[in-house]
Image (cartoon, rainbow, N blue to C red):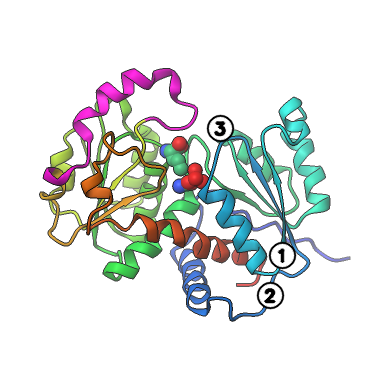
Amino acid sequence: MSVQQAPRHFLDINQFSNSTLRSILNKAIEYKKAGRNFNKPLLDHTLVLIFEKSSTRTRVSFEVGMRQLGGDVVVLGPRDSQMGRGESIGDTARVLSRFSDVIMIRTDSHKKLELLAENSSVPVINGLTDDSHPCQIMADIMTFEEHRGSIEGKTIAWVGDGNNVATSWLHAAVKFNFNFKIATPAELKLPESQIECAISEGCNVTITSIAKEAVKGADCVVADTWVSMGADNDRSKKIKLLEPFQVNEDLMALANSDALFMHCLPAHRGEEVTSSVIDGKQSVVWDEAENRLHAQKGILSYCLNII
Ligand code: CP
Ligand code: NVA
């Protein structure tokens, strides 16, 4: 009788060792260098992409990446499956596992992602939940290191909402050993449990409600939308709280002179960042977007046991 191995899910950066994360990034770098000059390691494999929220980068980079690896893709939007009419996550997981080799989901509640993974016999990838966005931060680490070398010991400053992307940066700070300074309004802080957990694992994290304090000495300043998908109810309240957290030239001038600017996109020029910064010399946002493709090919390779 063959013993079935547990599927290699990719749910959150804090669930992996540094060496596994490094092997995923090394594979991503290898794919990027190779361009189209590699065999098709995922021939006859199918990726199902489930989107309960909008996407440009995640949708296209996973689809293109899987095809470049030789595989096939099925995309399910919010109205394309019975999930939209109430079929349970568990049943969906069990059925999709019979047809496909790997599933990516972008959804609201993190619990749904976990339920999908618990009930799936094939790997599940987190393509963003209300709580985290690990694929993005893998691409961001890759981007930082392409421009500035090892991220270990460097200082990354987060300015804005304490949201899903910030949480994945915090997870990465623990695993990749960099300093993380977070400036958010007191009302929009990262969950205390996440901060406590990072500190208990030795993370050098600074929490402040003053943007200037966070960017001082930073090697990279990171912004994100002030209003995440699904958080529209509080839009006007959030925007008011976040106005002092705009990343503009004056704020960037307080960071290290060679500091990078990052944003996962989509961006709102004139809100969380000015055009002069996001379209300026320090910005690496287009590299971040491109590296989603390469990083996720690394993640697919991990999930499907080819690294
Ligand atoms: N950064 C990111 O995940 O972009 P999309 O919402 O377009 O997928
Ligand atoms: N924090 C943003 C990220 C979008 C990629 C959101 O959740 O909408």
Does residue 307 appear in the picture of this structure? yes
Spatial separation of the CA atoms under disc 3 and disc 2: 33 Å
Residue, disc 1: 71
Residue, disc 3: 108
- Residue at the image position 29 percent from the left and 58 percent from the top: 178
Q: Would you say residue 229 sits in the magenta stretch?
A: yes
Up-down: is 114 above or below 298? Answer: above
Secondary element under disc 3, as helix, strand or loop, is: loop
Tag 1 near tag 2, CB within 8 Å:
yes
Up-down: is 216 above or below 241? Answer: below
- Residue at the image position 71 percent from the left and 29 percent from the top: 84
Question: Which residue is farthest right?
Answer: 1
Q: Position of residue 209 (x, y in %)?
A: 20, 32
- Residue at the image position 62 percent from the left and 44 percent from the top: 105
Q: Which of 263 and 96 is in front in this view?
A: 263
User: Which label is found at residue 79?
Assistant: none
Up-down: is 65 above or below 34? Answer: above
Q: Where is residue 65 in the image (x, y as percent from the top left)?
A: 60, 63
Question: Which span is picked out in magenta?
Answer: 227-250
Categorize mark 1 by other alpha carbons within 10 Å: few (<14), some (14-19), many (20+): some
Q: Earlier in the sequence, mark 1 or mark 2?
A: 2
- The amino acid pointed to by label 3 is Asp
Q: Would you say residue 261 sits in the magenta stretch?
A: no
- The amino acid pointed to by label 1 is Gly
Q: Splitting the image into four quadrants, where does ligand 2 fall?
A: top left
Residue, disc 2: 40
- Residue at the image position 34 percent from the left and 19 percent from the top: 236
Q: Where is residue 222 in the image (x, y as percent from the top left)?
A: 29, 48
